[in-house]
Image: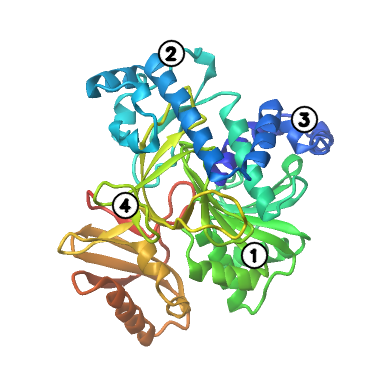
Amino acid sequence: MFSRLLTDLEQNSFKSVEKIPKSLRRFVEYGYRTIPLPIREGKIFRNWKKFLDESQWWNKREIEEYQLQQLSKLLNHAYKNVPYYQSLFEQEGIKPADIDDFDKLPLIPPLTKKIVKNNLNKLRARNFSESQFKITATSGSTGMPTVFYHQKGKSKAIEQAFHWRYRNIIGVKYSDEYIFLTGITTNLDRFDENVSWFKYYIPYRILVLSSYHLNHNYLKKYVKLIKSRPNSILFGFPSNLYALAKFLEKNEESFDNIKLTHTGSENSYSYQRSLMKTQFNSQVFDHYGNAEQCALFHQCEQADLYHIIPEYGISEIINQNGRLARNSGDTGNLYATSLTNYVFPFIRYDTEDIIEYSGKSCKCGRSFSTVKSIQGRIQEFLVDRTGIKMSLTGVIGALHSTIFRNLEKFQFFQEERGETILKIVKRKNFTNSDEKNILETFYSKMGKDINIKIEYVDDVIRTSRGKSVWVEQKLPI
């Protein structure tokens, strides 16, 4: 989600800055940079940030009261102003007042991506003017992007307030320097010795490195540049930062100037975080969110469990029996209700993400519910010949990091049930014993109802935004 915020920023503010004549640009950039971030972000940001700094210490009763109050407000608004929900409630024979506690939420059928696609105009609230709608979309990493709307001038400010509370919790200051290793290409079509391969955005204190060219030559340059920047925050997709950490390990190097590392937009695995922590000499934090702005989970200063952020939305983890996950270790599909978007309400939105519930209390003292892990998207599952779906997050997360020692990258490809191709980008010291170890290890976790064929490749596919996917899944699951 943080990467999407940067994409929005790049498409708007960054390009606006670049329209200024070069003779004045640096003067304007450094002048803008001196303005404290809360002032730059505006009144909506400041009001929400103040509220969130206080609400993070609410007890469970206060949290539930707030959520029920906001849910009632949202449902009444949707029933009165949104054609899709008017028809749905009448069809189901329910009224907003019927949903007076969380257990009644399942009376409302879930909102799917297909429904959003087929009812785009009917999901728009009629009590907002056209100028207040900002069209946006998901990254489309698992197929066609889902198009929807946010509220212009408000949604982004609220989103920033939530994310700055998260960053403040883990130790980021407004004035900290950032290094981004994400899908952003710095607006360049090629990378070679004659073209600048990084970009520094002065007003926002952000150094951007492209994730599309994580090869040996550029990683050497990335390492040199990162080492030259004292006391920085490192942010990126886990797969990108892991590639950087592996490069450091291979060359017996490490960073000593990274204040902290935080990741997002992909599943984060323990073996990745472990190597990052060692090679970056920093604590590693992770967060989960979606472009639809329905659910937000993030770690706190303890860097352990994920907190379900209650002011952001209502999250339901629905298990295979259609019931709400209540026991630690239960997994289920995430249905999310946004409490902040009124122009295009998402109510019980099927995110298609599988979440492992925790329910344990965090040592930080916050009363938020907790999640143990993000199991991944439904499409990031392999299917064996009996039809059982296996989460790659669950499988990979249980593997010992030593089997990855001689791999650069890997990715599964599946187009037939019970059959999968494991594409491997191997390192120079990869041997037949590594291949044998990999197959034996994966079979020990997946069982014998799936056949794994290894194929050696030069690279694996990434999404249009530079994100890595564990499975190129072609089955309709």
Residue picked out by circle 1? 283
Amino acid on which disc 1 is placed? Gln
Residue picked out by circle 3? 21
Q: Secondary structure at mark 2?
A: loop
Residue picked out by circle 2? 126
Q: Quadrant of residue 191?
A: bottom right
Residue 259 image offset from top left, x and y in percent = 72, 61
Amino acid on which disc 3 is placed? Pro
Q: Nearer the viewer, residue 47 or 8?
A: 47
Q: Secondary structure at mark 1?
A: loop
Amino acid on which disc 2 is placed? Arg
Residue 452 image offset from top left, x and y in percent = 25, 71
Q: Is residue 75 left or right of residue 320?
A: right
Asked if disc 2 and disc 3 are in contact, CB closer than 8 Å, the reply is no
Residue picked out by circle 4? 379
Callout in the foreground (2, 3): 2
